[in-house]
Image (cartoon, coloured by chain):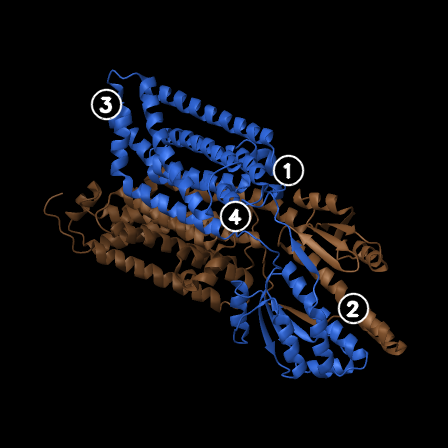
Chain colours: A brown, B blue
Amino acid sequence: MFLHNFKFELLSGLRVKEMIIWLILFPIALGTCFKVAFSSVYENTMVFEPIKVAVVTEEKTLDSEMFKETISQVKNEKDKLFKVKLCDRKKALKLLDDEEISAVIFAGNDISMTTASSGMSVTVAKAFLDQYIHSRDIIINAMKSGDTQAYESVMKAVSDDTQSVVKKQMTHGNTDMYIQYFYNLLAMVAMYGSLSGLHIAIGSQANLSALGARKNISPTPKLIQITASLCATFVMEAVCIVIAVTYTRFVLRIDYGDRLGLVYLAAVIGGCLGVSLGFMVGSIGKMSLGAKSAMCSAVSLGLCFFSGLMDGGMKAKVELAAPWFNRINPAALISDSIYCLNVYEDLSRFWEKIVSMVVITVILTLLGFVMTRRRRYASV
Amino acid sequence: MQVFKLFFMILRRRLVPVILYMGIFILILTSITSSGSQNESFKPSELRLVIYDEDGTEASRLAKDYLAKGNELVDIKDDDDEILDALYYTTIHYAVTINKGFEQKLEKGETDGLFTVRYVHDNYSNVLADNKMNEYVKTVSAYAASGMDVESASKKAAKTLKKQAEVTYQQNTKSSDEIMGMFFQYLPYVLFSAIISALGPVLITLDRKIVRDRTHCSALKLSRETFGKIGAASVFVMILWGVFLVAGAVISKGSYSGKTLYAVANSFIYALISTGIAILVASVVNNENVLNVIIQIFGLGSSFLCGVFVPQELLGKGVVTVSKALPAYWYVKANNSVFGLSEQTFDSGKVLLCFAAELGFAALIFALAFVLAKRKKS
């Protein structure tokens, strides 16, 4: 009986072609948009731009001349760190107001800076000024001491290239920040599985659909009917999500790391989680299909937003404000599980996420069963 | 008037999903907008650090105190797994260990390998932190080279490094409406999705064969039916738009005056475009779930391509060429000019040109919707 129901649930599901086509088209269209948009963003943000500053010398001193010389020569690992414009105070402040430069540096007996933002480039400029002031003070103090040998030692210590930091990269995976949008895209495909899951609940309730009314008068136990529907929907959702992973990996060439099999596993379990979410929402109360669909879409959208689909930094903000939410948000769990595969050598974190997803899937499915069981209809 | 009334009758029955959508979109808008704060003084970027002192000497304690200054010190157990989690979720940016033998090495004049740092994301913040450590070591060793013992050199270094360049913060005339700018930056996605999510199902119901046939067999002219539908949809959209504007004023704690009125006008035109798209999509799609998927493809896709979620100046030339064919591009371009975002400056002529482009899209979409309605009737 289970297999019979399963077969016909699968067949009737396949007949809703419109929905299936859009569920497959959704990641293809959106993934292509992401790829096109982010490839140029990545190029534009990875190319280092020298920090544009204006240097104003209001009084010409040896110090100000030394500073001008130093700032125009200082380089980072690849190129010049600053692009310097020498001008008077009025013009420099106008440039700052027009956002053509990041900061104005006033070089005289004292070094000071005026800025209109607190971004990273301004912080780097300020760090450079601080370093310059410190080195200058140390050298001047050593000169004042009159001890030539001590002065030479100090000069050597200040000018020597110090490598006091040993760096240990904790992962060898792809840490490109834009790839997380693709993880979240897969999470959204999975969450849209909730729309399919919704139909299982609606289709089993006699007061909400004609199909439900027909099923309720058949002698097949409800448990078998719903389990067969759930399994068939899991299979269809799995196919949709497998196509999404395959398209993003092999056509868009998104680097999911070298454990692709497990990426598929995480995505498929995520899809099942989406279906069970829809099943649970569909089983609540007596609301119409339209109202429940809207509820599912709104909840899926909200969960994906907090997982970082529209704002890449959102998950980190949630982690600081309410870390527990990242542990139970299905969309965050799906995107995190794929991230873990890409970034961590050790698989324990990945399995932790998978177990969380399975547990939530089971809980949501059981809740759906509890809410739909033993319903009797005197009249529909 | 009959179609107008019918529209609101259907809407009344679907009020719960509409309220739900509005709630979720206002939540999204609030979360995104409130993450941008307005600066009134210069604040150097602060790092969240965890520092482990393996040396346990006075010199290492002074080094720890120095590194903690100006940064946020986080307490996490020295365990690779826990650190990896914290780095991954960016609860911390950097895990610094002051290595054993720190003081001894400095006494000998050795400066290499005094700290070990663990990190996941390689970025400019890390370079700043590395520089801070190197500068500290350089200063301590310079004082030690002049004959001081390491402890005194460390104290003297901490004192020297306290001195900072004076920074004046100039309130930029263009950044005063920063939060308002962010609100209007993200508004097109929210407005588009909310309008179509709320309006689409009502229009689909209105376009259902049984309802459509009943209207068509009446004496009502097609033009009156279409204008009735458009009129009702417009009134409903104006209410939604008004709710979002009130939400914007509450979030940004400001009011609409001066230049921001251009932004209000811009969002009004975009609301019109969204209404047109909703009417157009609802006339070809008759399944609400499919409508939801299409909204997300168009809404998210055009937002990423046109510079809603990603600054427009970061988009490549090819992407910009394509996105010019989408109304969201002109919305964002006008908004950038109004609020001085993406390296743009305010130019009323440029803004009005963008409005004209958007109105052109609106006219095209409504004309297309009318043609489709006519074809459907025939």
The residue sitting at the right extreme is A148
Disc 1 residue type (three-letter): Lys
Q: Which residue is mark 4?
A: A248
SS at circle 4: helix
Tags 4 and 2 on a common chain: yes
**Mark 3 = which residue?**
B214
The local crowd at label 3, few if under 14, some if 14 to 19, many if 20 or more residues have their Cα within 10 Å, is few
Q: Is residue A236 visible?
A: no
Chain to which mark 2 belongs: A
Counting residues from the start of the chain, the first of labels 4 and 2 encountered is 2
Q: Position of residue A49 (x, y in %)?
A: 70, 49
**Disc 3 to disc 2, how far (Cα)?**
89 Å
Number of the label disc, if any, that sits on residue B317:
1
The alpha-carbon separation of the residues under discs 1 and 4 comes to 23 Å
Sequence-wise, the earlier of marks 3 and 1 is 3
The answer for which chain carries disc 4 is A
